[in-house]
Image: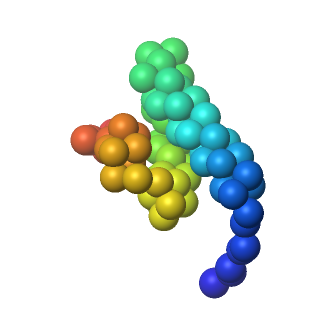
Amino acid sequence: MLGFLFNERECRELDYVLRKELDEMLFDLNDKRIDTDIKGAIESRYKVIFRMYARFASPKEISRYARNRVFR
């Protein structure tokens, strides 16, 4: 396990980067032109990024990015 110490500005920046990455992956998962194998890889990466984001985001923000279903 690794630990990091961030100041307030760095926390806001990390929050912004993770949110933008989650938004981009959600967009890609809804794109009909992307192959199912690629979507599977995006889905597994989404889970990792979402867990990182969930560690410091508010429950309201977490619910915005929570997915109801798993892509198959």
Residue at image x 49%, y 35%? 39
Q: Quadrant location of the N terminus?
A: bottom right
Q: Where is residue 57 in the image (x, y as percent from the top left)?
A: 47, 54
Is the residue 36 above or below the residue 9 in the image?
above
Q: Does residue 48 appear anywhere in the picture?
A: no
Query: Which color mode does the image show?
Result: rainbow
| Residue lying furthest bottom | 1
| Residue lying furthest front | 8
Q: Does residue 3 appear anywhere in the picture?
A: yes
| Residue lying furthest top | 33
Viewer-side residue, 28 vs 34: 28
Viewer-side residue, 35 vs 6: 6
Residue at image x 53%, y 26%? 28
Viewer-side residue, 15 vs 52: 15
Is the residue 53 above or below the residue 35 in the image?
below
Is the residue 46 above or below the residue 51 in the image?
above
Q: Position of residue 55 (x, y in %)?
A: 48, 64
Q: Position of residue 21 (x, y in %)?
A: 61, 38
Q: In this view, does 12 lie to the left or right of 35?
A: right
> Within the image, what quadrant is residue 70 found in?
top left
Residue at image x 47%, y 31%? 26
Is the residue 32 above or below the residue 44 in the image?
above
Viewer-side residue, 3 vs 33: 3
Instruction: Count the numbered circles shown.
Output: 0
Residue at image x 68%, y 79%? 3
Q: Quadrant location of the C terminus?
A: top left
Q: Is residue 9 left or right of residue 35?
A: right
